[in-house]
Image (spheres, rainbow, N blue to C red):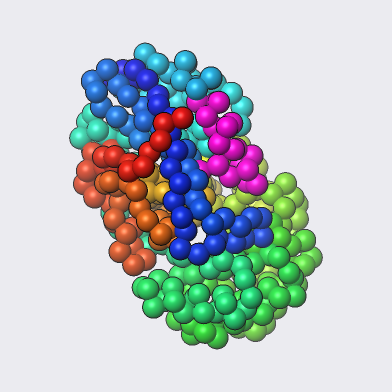
């Protein structure tokens, strides 16, 4: 089975509610969806949502990277030789991690299809059902409390609360959510780089003093400020999760050497796909650091890929794979199933994706 062509298209999917963080607001999820075609007429699916404020990737750059650089290097290569394909893919250019991730997952999809194995089993087969949190967008305390109640009523037991736009109001936001949902619901707080180190320590200690029972705080400071991140980690009792501070294996090694965070959030769009996600997970596990599997605003293709990796790995103990639940419709035929807060992986070859309704080639 050899790579014959890579076709690029896009899909636009409206969200149920605007997705708001300290970095951006999104009303419609725009996603690049690729099809890697082979000489045996099999198709591998991959996807990448442009996320300029985090990865620096936009639609045009993803398209240009795949068409102009990646595709010419991969056409003719044999799917059996994943190691060589990944070496060429990752060495084709620096950065451009979203473009690489889309191609990476399509290659693994093809490998699974060729050998009739679901990717969660290929990556270890640890579980086929994953519990995900759901994101509560940053808004007024009252609106966030109401959104949290709705999420709990929909079957979610873990809330990922977006904050970071106002250091004074953030405490009120989290307090309102805890009062609304009670003590048995898990709350994670994501500041999306919105605080300064001393602010973060002050706010997190306040959470602790108020007994709000926060499970973890994600990326409280700027992505480049590892010293600031370490300062926060060293001065609070709550676990600190590194997100934007860790793109690939190199950053993971540096962060662990510094003991700058308690946990690492792996995202395919940051690290360039499943190949590098496996490296980060292995490094973290070796050093006793547990991981979360996160996402940008991927549709079902990207979420199925991330969930498949999560299903395979014991060291990924937390999941933030909720974006399909945030979308008003699902154009993907096949892939994982979503039931309440569960992402269920089926025993279909590869990703199990069959087609994408509304896919428009570009």
Q: Which residue is depicted at the point 30% across and 64% down?
A: 339
Q: Which residue is depicted at the point 51% across and 79% down?
A: 146
**Residue 43 among magenta residues:** no
Closer-to-camera residue (177/215): 177
Q: Which residue is depicted at the point 20% across and 35% down?
A: 116
Closer-to-camera residue (78/148): 148
154 shown above or below 105? below
Quadrant in which the N terminus is drawn: top left
Q: Residue 241's image quarter?
A: bottom right
Q: How many labels does the image show?
A: 0
Closer-to-camera residue (203/349): 349
Report whether residue 296 is seen.
yes
Relative to 329, is 349 on the left or the right? left
Residue 23 point in image, percent of width and height:
66, 55
Report whether residue 252 is seen.
no
Write down the region rendered in magenta.
49-66
Relative to 327, is 253 on the left or the right? right
**Residue 62 among magenta residues:** yes
193 shown above or below 348? below
Residue 242 point in image, percent of width and height:
61, 54
Q: Which residue is depicted at the point 34% across and 19% down?
A: 3
């Amino acid at each position: 089975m050899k790579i014959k062509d890579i076709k690029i298209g896009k899909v636009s999917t409206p969200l149920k509610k605007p997705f708001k963080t300290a970095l951006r607001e999104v009303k419609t999820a725009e996603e690049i969806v690729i099809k890697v075609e082979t000489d045996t007429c099999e198709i591998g699916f991959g996807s990448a949502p442009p996320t300029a404020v985090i990865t620096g990737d936009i639609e045009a750059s993803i398209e240009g990277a795949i068409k102009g650089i990646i595709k010419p290097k991969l056409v003719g290569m044999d799917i059996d030789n994943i190691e060589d394909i990944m070496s060429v893919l990752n060495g084709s250019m620096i950065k451009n991690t979203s473009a690489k991730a889309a191609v990476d997952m399509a290659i693994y999809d093809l490998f699974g299809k060729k050998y009739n194995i679901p990717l969660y089993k290929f990556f270890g087969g640890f579980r086929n059902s994953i519990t995900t949190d759901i994101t509560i967008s940053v808004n007024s305390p009252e609106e966030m409390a109401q959104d949290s109640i709705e999420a709990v009523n929909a079957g979610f037991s873990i809330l990922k609360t977006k904050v970071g736009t106002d250091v004074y109001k953030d405490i009120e936001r989290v307090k309102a959510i805890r009062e609304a949902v009670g003590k048995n619901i898990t709350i994670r707080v994501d500041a999306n780089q919105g605080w300064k180190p001393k602010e973060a320590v002050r706010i997190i200690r306040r959470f602790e003093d108020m007994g709000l029972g926060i499970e973890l705080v994600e990326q409280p400071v700027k992505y480049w400020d590892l010293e600031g991140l370490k300062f926060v980690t060293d001065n609070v009792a709550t676990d600190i999760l590194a997100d934007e501070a860790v793109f690939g294996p190199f950053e993971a090694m540096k962060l662990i050497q510094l003991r700058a965070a308690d946990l690492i959030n792996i995202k395919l769009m940051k690290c360039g796909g499943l190949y590098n996600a496996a490296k980060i997970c292995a490094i973290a596990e070796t050093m006793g650091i547990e991981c979360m599997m996160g996402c940008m605003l991927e549709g079902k293709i990207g979420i199925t890929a991330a969930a498949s990796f999560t299903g395979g790995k014991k060291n990924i103990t937390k999941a933030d794979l909720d974006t399909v639940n945030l979308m008003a419709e699902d154009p993907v035929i096949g892939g994982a199933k979503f039931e309440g807060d569960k992402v269920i992986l089926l025993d279909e070859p590869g990703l199990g994706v069959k087609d994408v309704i509304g896919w428009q080639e570009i």
